[in-house]
Image (cartoon, coloured by chain):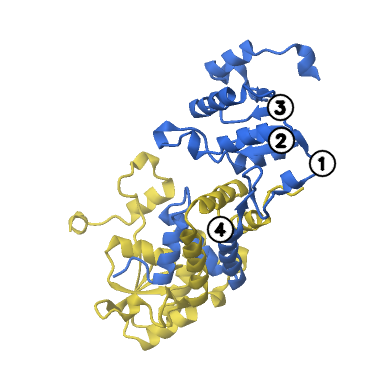
Chain colours: A blue, B yellow
Amino acid sequence: MNEYSSKLLETAVHELARLPGIGKKTALRMALHILSEEAAYATNLGNAVMRMREEIVFCKKCNNISDTEECAICANPKRDENTLCVVEDTRDVLAIENTAQFNGLYHVLGGIINPIEGIGPNDIHVRHLIERVNTEEINEVILALPATVEGDTTNFYIYKLLKPFEVSITTIARGVAVGNELEFTDEITLGRSILNRLPFDDFAK
Amino acid sequence: MNEYSSKLLETAVHELARLPGIGKKTALRMALHILSEEAAYATNLGNAVMRMREEIVFCKKCNNISDTEECAICANPKRDENTLCVVEDTRDVLAIENTAQFNGLYHVLGGIINPIEGIGPNDIHVRHLIERVNTEEINEVILALPATVEGDTTNFYIYKLLKPFEVSITTIARGVAVGNELEFTDEITLGRSILNRLPFDDFAK
């Protein structure tokens, strides 16, 4: 006898359980929820997932995911096209957009260099970045990669490639998070925040 | 400007975030995971959800969800059709099936009496249960509802309706969970497990 009384339920649970962080029990709870909702919800959910996968493209300029050849950010004439922010993936674009502190353009690498997972410089959009710096009028490249060993490796790799160009290369500030106590901040972060201390004038701006 | 660079992504995140226990951030993580997988996964997931919602039916005998008019458990000639286990929903059927300790048939109520949420006796399959006891050859009805006030209310309601019939009515044992320490068991459970103590002969069986 099958574990589930319904093959249709079993298939749906199996597919839902392939989503990240979702186990069999949560998938079953989701499937029963979908069954208890009106039929339109299952149709909307199913179609949204399939249409997204079929129709989404990568922006030809910045590699961000987009509905059109050029994404809404790249196509926006109000954005400062002389400043480029280099990020790992779309989630980082969303996170930075939510701060409302950046008005330039992005360059999405689609990953970072990670030898353990077999991701080398040719597996991410680095060459495309160099091309952009070479052909577009870019004054500043902001490296906004994760504060990890892999992020630092990628930062350094890109830094070396961009050095010959007349472009200022910056990286986002690392230090004590706003609202955090010093005693609970790890030593490396605290150490760096002392080394990279700012004139209070800059801070108060 | 839109929060997401893609309307297709936004729609998928919106629909995924309607699943129970899934917030916007998890939904975004799921959507990006679906985008990174091969196209077949999105198609399989979408179709599985839609087909399940469209084609699943409720077993005409026990109200369990099923692919056919009569579910696999009711249709199985090896099951003991004289014993009926009354449960709240499909998840409970799965949980009991997984114990491999029950070989009878089920009756799925589809809910329990809950005045606060406006669920009365006519909103769940109680009348259908009485009909079954009246027409089928049932010797024992096992009440396996949640050990909550609502479960107890429903138990008592069903008990009163079934009393006139020649059928033995039992309920699943409540007591200290296997593997638990006495000192961490709540007083009501511990109290009941003393009141409902068993001859050690029964226990050792």
**Residue that label 4 marks:** A53
Tell which tag, 4 or 3, sits nearer the viewer. 3
Say which residue appears at 49% left-offset and 33% top-offset: A121
- SS for callout 3: strand
State the CA–CA distance, disc 2 to disc 1. 17 Å
What's the CA distance linking mark 2 and mark 4?
A: 31 Å
**Marks 2 and 4: CB-CB under 8 Å?**
no
Q: Which label is found at residue B113?
A: none
Q: Secondary structure at mark 2?
A: loop
Subunit ID for the residue under disc 4: A
Cα distance between the residues tagged 1 and 4: 30 Å
Q: Which mark is residue A140?
A: 3
Q: Is residue B58 above or below residue B97?
A: below
The local crowd at label 3, few if under 14, some if 14 to 19, many if 20 or more residues have their Cα within 10 Å, is some
Both on one chain, marks 3 and 2?
yes
- Three-letter code, disc 3: Glu
Query: Residue A138 location, x and y as percent?
Result: 72, 31
In the rendered image, residue B65, in percent from the top left (x then y), is placed at 44, 73
Give the secondary structure at mark 4.
helix
Chain of the residue where label 3 is placed in the rendered structure: A
Front: mark 2 or 4: 2
Quadrant for the C terminus of chain B, please. bottom left
Which callout, 4 or 3, points at the residue further toward the start of the chain?
4
Question: Which amino acid is tagged 2?
Answer: Glu
Q: Quadrant of residue B122?
A: bottom right
Task: Characterize the local packing of mark 1: few (<14), some (14-19) or many (20 or more) Cα atoms within 10 angstroms.
Answer: few
Q: Which residue is mark 2?
A: A136
Farthest bottom residue? B135
The residue at which mark 1 appears reads as A78
Q: Dots 2 and 1: beta carbons under 8 Å? A: no
In the image, taking residue A102 as reference, residue B181 lies left or right, namely left
From the viewer's perspective, tell me whether residue B138 is left or right of residue A143.
left
